[in-house]
Amino acid sequence: MNEKHNRNAPYWAIALVTFGVLGLSTIWIDFGKFWKGYVLDMTGPAWNYILFRGLYTAHADNIWTRFFTPNRTLAIFLIVCFGIETLQYFKIYTSTFDLWDLLAYISILVPLYLIDNRIIGKAKNTPHNKKYSAFGR
């Protein structure tokens, strides 16, 4: 498991930086309505998933990494993202509700989750992986 994680860490690090730069560049550059309205909603949860899961660095086995399993991380992020939109819908704070934001949130997040879970599933079968992998390999 450690070997597989460490071998993929540079690719996750590149994805983390790419999503971070793309998301933050929406406040610096104006490429139109889609760019301003959805790119940060797409990349923000994605880069945070990589960050929270610790995919971009050498494998670690600690309280943080044991807590932020793929399933738990996805669930927390979806609750937060959809919660933000729900607050906007009910006008709890000044913002604009947009139903398309819900699709934007999951457009990159869910594929990253599936890739992460697939990598765990292909790694050596351990009790930890069987317990936390959606594929249960």
Image: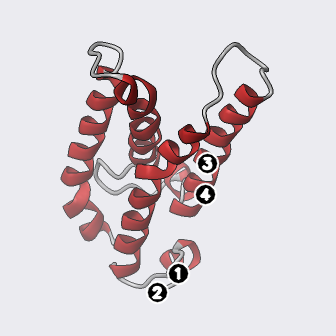
Please tell me how crowded label 2 is: few (under 14), some (14-19), or many (20+) other residues with Cα within 10 Å. some
Closer to the observer: label 1 or label 4?
4
Q: Secondary structure at mark 4?
A: helix
Q: Are marks 3 and 1 in contact (CB under 8 Å)?
A: no
Image quadrant where one finds the N terminus: bottom left
Look at the numbered disc 1 and give the secondary structure of its residue.
Answer: helix
Q: Residues within 10 Å of mark 1 (few under 14, many from 20)?
A: some
Residue that badge 3 annotates: 78
Across and down, in percent, residue 23 comes to 35, 29
Badge 4: how crowded within 10 Å, few (<14), some, or many (20+)? few
Q: Choose top left, top right, bottom left or bottom right for residue 48.
A: top left
Whole-Å distance between the Cαs marked 4 and 2?
18 Å
- Mark 2 near mark 1, Cβ–Cβ under 8 Å? yes
Between the residue at mark 3 and the residue at mark 1, the CA separation in whole angstroms equals 23 Å
Instruction: Say if mark 1 contacts mark 4, CB within 8 Å.
Output: no
Q: Which residue is mark 1?
A: 130
In this rendering, position of residue 18 left or right of residue 45: left
Task: Tell me the residue at 29%/21% (across/down).
Answer: 25
Q: Amino acid at mark 2?
A: Arg
Q: CA distance from mark 2 to mark 1?
A: 6 Å
Q: Closer to the N terminus: mark 1 or mark 4?
A: 4
C-alpha distance separating marks 1 and 4: 15 Å
